[in-house]
Amino acid sequence: MFYLYHNDYIKLYNKKGELVAEGYFNSINRYTSGMEILSHDNSKFTGKKTNIFTFKTKGAIEKYVVDYLGNLYKVKKEKRLAFHRK
């Protein structure tokens, strides 16, 4: 389990296990349940429906950490963030 934040690098897979899209997470449309993905230069993908991934397709989402040299490391589990009331 992990959290998704703006500009997190993710890979999206369909239910067959095929890679659908990869890039930086931008936003979620709550009306269509679609996720918008941006490429490394902040442009949207030009392919057919490659920048939208809906949760209805029951695919998999993998989150990666990118280091300074561009190497990708898969995030297996993140520590839960504490919620502090004021």
Image (spheres, rainbow, N blue to C red):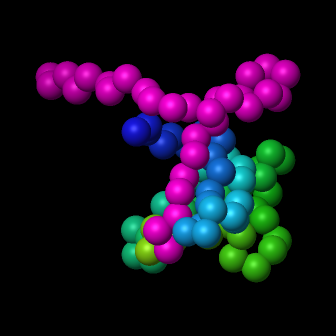
Q: Is residue 86 above or below residue 59?
A: above
Q: Is residue 78 covered in magenta?
A: yes
Can you name the residue that lies furthest to the left here? Answer: 86
Q: Is residue 28 above or below residue 23?
A: below
Q: At 43% from the left edge and 37% from the top edge, which residue is drawn? A: 2
Residue 29 appears in the rendering: no
Residue 48 appears in the rendering: yes
* Residue 70 screen position, x and y as percent: 82, 28
* Residue 12 screen position, x and y as percent: 62, 57
Can you name the residue that lies furthest to the front here? Answer: 16
Horizontal arrangement in the rendering, residue 64 relative to residue 66 (left or right): left
Q: At 83% from the left edge and 47% from the top edge, which residue is drawn? A: 41
Q: At 74% from the left edge and 32% from the top edge, which residue is drawn? A: 72
Q: Is residue 1 above or below residue 71?
A: below
Horizontal arrangement in the rendering, residue 68 relative to residue 18 (left or right): right
Query: In the rendered image, which quarter contains the C terminus?
Result: top left
Q: At 69% from the left edge and 76% from the top edge, which residue is drawn? A: 49
* Residue 62 screen position, x and y as percent: 57, 46
Nearer to me, 48 or 59: 59
What residue span does the magenta drawing correspond to?
Answer: 57-86
* Residue 23 screen position, x and y as percent: 71, 50
Q: Is residue 52 above or below residue 24?
A: below
Nearer to me, 31 or 12: 12
